[in-house]
Amino acid sequence: MTSVTAEPRTEEVLAPRPASPRPRRAGWRTFRYAVLILSLLVVLIPVYVLFVTSFKGMGDATPARTWFFPRTWTLENWVEAWTALSPALLRTFAMVIPAAVISSLLGSMNGFVLSRWRFPHANLVFTLILFGMFIPYQAVMIPLVQLMIDLGVPNGIPSLILLHVVYGIPICTLIFRNYYETVPMELIESARVDGAGLLRTYFSVVLPISIPSFVVVLLWQFTSAWNDFLFAIFFSSASNGPVTMALNNLANGAMLSNYGVSMAGALIASLPTLLVYILLGRYFVGGLMAGSVKG
């Protein structure tokens, strides 16, 4: 049996074909890569200046040679910066860890109660807690200083722990409340059917499944407390303050003599938060995707 193939008509042969989308897609892909590379350079240029300057000697670390590699690589700046900052680094760890853990636990309890216990005016209470997120620190600094004096809280790390716990509660409550809203209600009701009360339900059922949100909140609080400088100025001194205070004193003292020490100190002060994000960054993203910022 002979097959018959239909010949294209003359109009179809002469009609212009639609332009291929491939060149357009390639151009759009090139533009996106260009934007990404440009953004990466904007972020990395300060890091490059910090890094190369921290290895320059006294006469080499000058504004005229900002973009150049060191003539001679030296570790003297790192040794001097570490000697000056190491006591403050220990004090900062002593402040950041309890502040992050306590604020996360309190925020988790608040979030669970506000999401699963519909008591009268629960939404008003939640709104008032969130109101604390929008109060500028500068506006309440003088009353806070007087409050710490009246409460008798020692200046330095104890005051900073208390302040970071209090100011961390609103954001922690918001993240945990939104996360617990995604927990199936049947899971909570089954625990109540088995006779568990509110606290037993929280510690035995809710807390074990809150690990993704805890990772998010702990990382957030750790970074916020570590990088804080305003509270450190008001509630500590050079002898009992965190690393940001020590870094400020180091930069002011070395500004006219050696930029390399200041740059090495800045990198040393940044390493803990950088390592935390490198080690736990994927869990941070996973916690965000698990619903901790929904709602």
Image: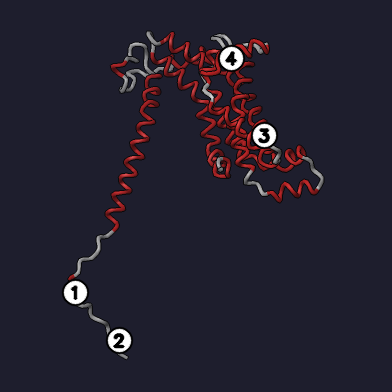
Q: Within 10 angstroms of label 1, few (less than 14), some, or many (20 or more) residues?
A: few
The three-letter amino acid code for the residue at tag 1 is: Glu
Q: Residue at x 64, y 31 (%)?
A: 104
Q: Amino acid at mark 2?
A: Ser
Local SS, label 3: helix
Distance from label 4 to label 1 (Cα)? Answer: 84 Å
Residue ID for mark 4: 143
Q: Earlier in the sequence, mark 3 or mark 2?
A: 2
Give how far apart the Cα atoms at labels 3 and 1 are. Answer: 73 Å
Residue 11's tag is 1
The residue under label 3 is 110
Where residue 92 appears, as percent x and y from the top left, is 58, 19
Which of the image's four quarters has the C terminus? Answer: top right
The secondary element bearing badge 4 is classed as helix
Disc 2, SS:
loop
**Relative horizontal placement of residue 69, taking residue 178 as reference (left or right):** left
The N terminus: image quadrant: bottom left
Q: Is residue 161 above or below residue 41?
A: above
**How far separated are the C-alphas under marks 2 and 1?**
24 Å
Q: Residue at x 67, y 38 (%)?
A: 114
Above or below, 277 against 251 in this view is below
Instruction: Kindly report the distance in space between the C-alpha atoms of the residues bearing marks 3 and 2.
Output: 77 Å
Q: How many marks?
A: 4
Mark 3 and mark 4: Cα distance apart in space: 26 Å
Q: Is residue 238 above or below residue 24?
A: above
Mark found first going from the N terminus, 2 or 1: 2
Q: Which mark is residue 162?
A: none
**Whole-percent x, y for residue 27 in the image:** 28, 49
Disc 3: CA contacts within 10 A as few (<14), some (14-19) or many (>=20): many
Amino acid type, residue under disc 3 in the picture: Asn
